[in-house]
Structures are given as C-alpha cells and as structure tokens.
Amino acid sequence: MDEEDRRIETHPDLVDPNWQKHAELDAWLGAKKELKKKRRRQRKAAASGGGYREPGSSRWPGIAAIAGLIVLVVAAVTVNAVQERGVNETPWFPLDESQITRLVTDA
C-alpha cells in the first residue's frame, strides 16, 4: 500500500459508495445493539429494586448487623436493670462487718 492509499480522504474503500453504505449500516446496527444492551441493563436494574448497588450485593447483612447491635444493647440495658449486685460490687470477703460482729458475739 502506498502513501496515497493510507490517507483517509483518498482511501479506496472510503471512496467506494457501496462500501460507505455498508459502513453506515454496520455503524447503525452497532449503535442499535448498544442501545438494546443499555435498555436491558436499565430494565434489569429497575427490576432488582434500584440501580445503585453492585451486582451480587445485598442489604441483608447490613440490616442483620444493625438488628444484632440493637438486640445486644437492649440485652445489656435489661441485664443491668435486673441485676442486683455486680461482680465488682461484691466485697472480697463474703460477709460484711455487721455479719462478722453477729457471728463473733453469738459464738
């Protein structure tokens, strides 16, 4: 191929009117195919409940984590309210001074 054939304006395929018709048809069909793909993706995204999430992702793990956190907080508050004496509140020696005095004087 010589230098004259490499130029776009004078390329033999581009000058041929039949080739131009085929090129225009191919371009039109390609654009139509891309438009079909785009519409299919939009329909699929709309059917899945929105188009903002990545494919394969789900909201359920996040919802389960928040629900679990709420359950843990409610359980902690309930246990704290029901509990009479905590581990750190019990004396080292199981008897307090009044009980020791009573044991010593009664014996």
Image (cartoon, helix red, strand yellow):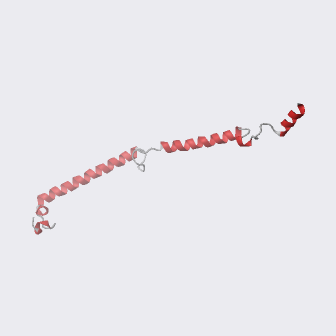
Residue 87 vertical placement versus 14 (above, below): above
61 sits to left or right of 26 = right
Closer-to-camera residue (58/51): 58
Q: Residue at x 32, y 47 (%)?
A: 40
104 sits to left or right of 49 = right
Q: In the image, residue 106 lies at what x, y percent? A: 89, 31
Q: Quadrant of residue 105?
A: top right
Q: Residue at x 66, y 42 (%)?
A: 77
Closer-to-camera residue (97/36): 97
Q: In the image, residue 27 lies at what x, y percent? A: 21, 56
Q: Quadrant of the C terminus?
A: top right
Q: Residue at x 71, y 40 (%)?
A: 87
Farthest residue toward the right?
A: 105
What is the tally of numbered marks visible in this picture? 0
Q: Quadrant of the N terminus?
A: bottom left
Q: Residue at x 77, y 39 (%)?
A: 93
Closer-to-camera residue (87/41): 87
Q: In the image, residue 21 lies at what x, y percent? A: 15, 57
Q: In the image, residue 98 lies at what x, y percent? A: 85, 38
Residue 18 vertical placement versus 81 (above, below): below
Residue 52 vertical placement versus 75 (above, below): below
Q: Quadrant of residue 90?
A: top right
